[in-house]
Amino acid sequence: MKMKQFLLLFLLLLPVAANADDSGTCGDNLTWTFNEATGTLTISGNGDMANYERNKSPWKSYSQEMLSVLIEEGVTSIGGWAFYDCSGLTSVTIPNSVTSIGAYAFSGCSGLTSITIPNSVTSIGNDAFSGCSGLTSVHISDLEAWCKIYFNDGSNPLYYAHHLFLNGEEIKNLVIPNSVTSIGDNAFYNCSGLTSVTIPNSVTSIGGEAFSGCSGLTSVTIPNSVTSIGNHAFENCSGLTSITIPNSVTSIGFAAFYGCSGLTSVHISDLEAWCKIYFSYDNPLYYAHHLFLNGEEINNLVIPNSVTSIRDHAFYGCSGLTSVTIPNSVTYIGYSAFSNCSGLTSVTIPNSVTTIEDNAFRNCSGLTSVTIPNSVTSIGDNAFYNCI
């Protein structure tokens, strides 16, 4: 009889054991509990979550069973590799106490369709969301806080989601708040849902890849406060047809407008300021071909007397130019300064110029003659290549 009672008790306990919660620690003051019945991982306590190596999180054995993650208020960080390859994960709750999301934290979570980033987050580590191919939306409640997040390489979930929502409404006509002084690297990377961007006078710099891949973007307003445009800042913004570069800009980074194949015009209001911009690689004229000064296209270019050198890539690809007059103040013509200006038929180089850099007039196929003054002591490689 006792044996039968024991067997009965054992059989009654079997389902309980099968559905029992598993738990442990995941930081000095944090605990985790996984409920097998609901597929929910709950993290509780106060302080930072531990960082892990790939496939070394304490709940890794449940990675394919995990459906939702609930991180409770008090947790201040999400550890590196924490939820790596949890492909069945469909829901994540991140509290406003979290300030950082570690590298690869949600990498490979292909089941996630949306993510809400709280205002408290100030940094997101490398590839935090790489492989989250199911993402269709990112939700925020504070645009200023979003602009100030430090995104590492490949860390912005917009790479897959493409659509950013502010308090439940998709942002299409983006107006950066006046409280923002710089737009961080990768801030709106691949946000193809954007159609227009207005940047206020408070902003002085546009970060690298800030709007890269925003293929739906047709209009950008850059104020006269911006001094630098970062590497790849507007790369592959193929919907842009024109861009206005304010006088305040002194540097444009590497490939900042690369892939902006829809550009047809670049607008400026100060020719001297344009000539003094430091171009890391090319400039938007590579695609636009036509430069406008105060609304009127420049065909017969007269460089101002205040200019002492024509920077590298300054008029690269400006096929709308037909003539160029360079004043006696100029001593240096930079690398690829007039390269690919195929409409150019006349160039006046003064006796003050000492250096003509590599590719300076490369592919200026409309030039039939050019006079090199006695002052020139150095002509770079391919400076007049393909000038028939």
Image: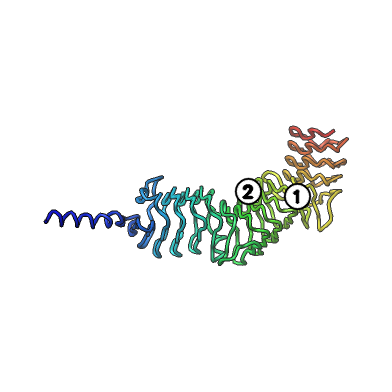
Q: Quadrant of residue 296?
A: bottom right
Q: Position of residue 49 (x, y in %)?
A: 38, 56
Identity of the amino acid at label 2? Asn
Q: State whether residue 54 is above or below residue 173.
A: above
Tell how many labels: 2
Distance (Cα) linking label 2 and label 1: 19 Å
Disc 2 crowd rating (10 Å Cα; few below 14, some 14-19, many 20+) is: many
Q: Position of residue 264 (x, y in %)?
A: 77, 50
Q: Residue at x 56, y 67 (%)?
A: 167
Q: State whether residue 59 is above or below residue 335.
A: below
Secondary structure, mark 1, is helix
Judging depth in this view, the residue of 262 and 253 nearest the camera is: 262
> Which label is found at residue 231?
2
Quadrant where the N terminus lies?
A: bottom left
Q: How is the image coloured?
A: rainbow
Identity of the amino acid at label 1? Cys
Q: Position of residue 123 (x, y in %)?
A: 49, 56
Q: Position of residue 193 (x, y in %)?
A: 63, 57
Judging depth in this view, the residue of 353 and 158 nearest the camera is: 158
Secondary structure, mark 2, is loop
Quadrant where the C terminus lies?
A: top right
Q: Earlier in the sequence, mark 2 or mark 1?
A: 2
Residue pointed to by mark 1: 275
Front of the two marks 2 and 1: 2
Residue 217 makes an appearance in the image: yes
Disc 1 crowd rating (10 Å Cα; few below 14, some 14-19, many 20+) is: many
Judging depth in this view, the residue of 21 and 300 nearest the camera is: 21
Residue 32 makes an appearance in the image: no
